[in-house]
Image (cartoon, coloured by chain):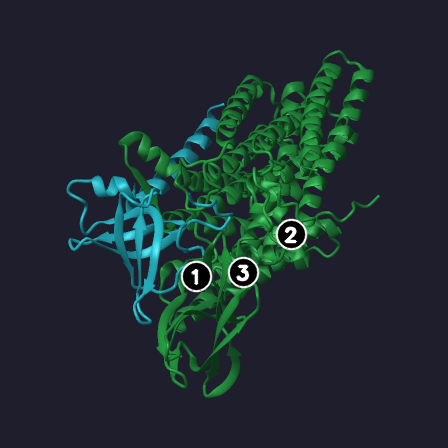
Chain colours: A cyan, B green
Amino acid sequence: MPKKFFAIGLLVVAVGLLSYFGLQQATTYYYEISDFLNLDPPPYDETVRINGIVADIKRDELGPINFKLLDATGKEAEIQVIYQQGQVPDTFQEGTSAVVEGVYTREGIFEAHSILPKCASHYEAKE
Amino acid sequence: MAEAGYVFLVLTLIAGIVAAIFFILGKIRNSPILLRNANIATIALFSLATASILVLLFAILGHHFEIEYVASYTSRSTPTPYLISALWAGDSGSILLWAWVLGLFAFLCLKKKDPYAMTTIMVVEIFLFMLVIVTNPFARLSVPLEDGMGINPLLEHPAMLIHPPAILAGYAGVTVVFAFAISALLEKRFDRSWLDKSHAWAVLSWLLLGAGNLLGAWWAYVELGWGGYWAWDPVENAGLMPWLVMTAFLHSAITSRKEGLLNSWSIGLAITSFILVIFGTFITRTDILSSVHTFGQTAMSNYLSAFLIISVVGSLVLYLLRHKDIKEAGTIKTLLSKEGMLLLTNFFFLGSALLVFIGTIFPAITELITGTKATTGAEFFNSTSVPLFVAIILLLALCSLVSWQKALSGRSKELGIAAGSAAIITIILVATGIGEWYVLTASFVAAFALIAILLDTFRRTNMAKRNWGAYVIHLAIIIMAIGIIGSSAYDHYTEITLAPGESANVGNYTLTYNQLELQGDERRMIIEADVSVLSNNHYITTLKPQRAVQSYWGDWVWTSEVAIRSTPVEDLYLALLDWDENENVLIGATINPLIMWLWIGGSIFLAGGLLLFWPRKG
């Protein structure tokens, strides 16, 4: 049945093309925080996503959110993150993991432009 | 109590194994006695599963904090409805609920007298109960606690009482449809009988998944306080993909039942839906995708991946072996006939499910190839699925104007009216200053579809009640599309800092911040900003966005209770972000145009779905 294969082939090509163009504009490298800090040189000024544990959430006076992103042990890797837009999902809490998307600056500060905290299915207690 | 629950679980598993063996042997040996015993084993399975879930429920309601599950998800101060929701708050509880619902469905399917389908359901049941036993919800703590940890404050929302059970019951319904498809393959019985048997289950599971996804979106919007409702997170995608494929299946099944076409497709889609269900359960319980939204790596992961592989390989091999035997009543001659359009609908839904799938597993693929994970963002999903959704809505319009086996004919007048009025609406939109081509395209298509469907509806005056269901659902989809277009293309977010008595303009509104109020009880403390909303110097309402804090797992958890003023035109969505000692506040204000239509459309969608169950005449 060549007709059927033609149809399926068309579907595959269409999906392939759409995803190719989609991925062209929307691919971001993703790192665990310890892996990211081990990169030499770190990818400065390039949009990346980093996963880590949120700690020490502080706000400047009614301004941006500052917090630390730690590795799972909480000791070996640490990045200071600043997030200018103040609205984050409620799932953003100290001690939970979050993926920050943004740019690592030469000053060693991560300027996040979006925060994707782990969702609320439930939290396991962190050791 | 804990031991009784565990014993019930083990007995349920045994009943499942016995039922599976009896069903398949009874079928092969054609033995009514074995089949009768298989039925008894099925009833036993359902009763025992009910017993185990009741034990868990009583343990939760009775505050048996010596049980780890109870202590992890409830406390003495948890309100009763959320005590019940703790049943599905945890990993093992959620699988238990799924398995129980499937047990209920298995019991209800007994009257269909389909031993192969029952065997398939039992195999899935065996697997699910193995998962529950491995992660034992009745496990005791070494040291009993005086009080439990309580419910995650974010899950204290009415949507969470319905959203998870709806999705899980939807999963169970998909399993039933899959079971009938497998049975048809095993028996080489490729007439419409398997579709007739599974029809109600397919519609039910599709509705449940739809309702579950909608409620999840609504919960994210009103509870998470970030102004959006869909983040294309792997867990959301896990609920969406089976729904997309089930939608394709329903359309393919119509063609198979009415015209005897696309039979092979229908079976393939039923299998795909089930695989996506298992896949979704799997990805939310492992770390492979580093989802921001998982239950975390658990003991289940290995079992789940094994079962995923078994179900993919097993059903694929069976499908390929039997594929040649599937008879079609003919071929589709033109795409401009109803069956042709239904096939295209299939393609588009399957295609969008595939795209969501690619986006979801993309990090795992890139890690496999390059060693580094690359992720896709919402942009990927939006830019790839939106064109397909627009195409689907266009099809929806055309489809209402064509008949079976005939190309578009004799309906050019209606086509013209619909296209003409849609063009006028689009021109009006351009005149009001809307310039984005994608918004205009989407609006044109939505208007075209809306008018085409309405014209078609007026033409059919004596349609059966259940046929109205499909019309209502199609209308609902378009209404939802309007909400999605408006809120995603024109949402607008600003942050404003205000001192008491100070005002700021947001969109057409003037917000005046009056004061900060502190409330609280023993469970939580609430900080509330009192904001008057004016539009054109007229007072409209007072919004009170809140931040609440309560203790959970020994940490302070802050949650935002947003304040929303909804109108059909737009939502004004305020979140209290921060304040200082002088009671100055930082407020996040989002304007979401037309978003109310998403929820209105969603409600109509569900109502239309219920119409599909209207009893057939005679």
Q: Position of residue B23 (x, y in %)?
A: 73, 20
> Is there any visible trace of residue B48 in the rendered image?
yes
Please tell me the numbered disc located at residue B413.
none
- Residue B155 is situated, as x and y percent measured from the top left of the image, at 55, 54
Q: Residue B83 carries which label?
A: 2
Looking at the image, tell me whether mark 3 or mark 2 is earlier in sequence order. 2
- Foreground label between 3 and 2: 2
Q: Point out the residue furthest to the right here.
A: B618
Q: In this view, does A65 lie to the left or right of B446?
A: left
Horizontal side of B10 relative to B396 (left or right) equals: right
Q: Is residue B593 left or right of residue B256?
A: left
Image position of B484 (left or right of B506) = right
**Residue B105 position within the rendered picture, expressed as x and y whole percent measured from the top left:** 71, 36
Tell whether label 2 touches label 1 (CB within 8 Å): no
- The nearer-to-camera label among 1 and 3 is 1
Mark 3 Cα shell of 10 Å, populated few (<14), some (14-19), many (≥20): many
**Which residue is label 3 attached to?**
B598
- Three-letter amino acid code of the residue under disc 3: Leu
Identity of the residue furthest to the top in this view: B29
On the same chain, marks 3 and 2? The answer is yes
CA distance for labels 1 and 2: 27 Å
Q: Are marks 3 and 2 in contact (CB under 8 Å)?
A: no
* Residue at the disc numbered 1: B226
In the displayed structure, B555 sits above or below B540; it is above
Q: Are marks 1 and 2 on the same chain?
A: yes
| Alpha carbons under labels 3 and 2: distance apart | 30 Å
Q: Is mark 3 on a helix, strand or loop?
A: helix
**Element assignment for label 2:** helix
Q: Can residue B329 be seen in this view?
A: no
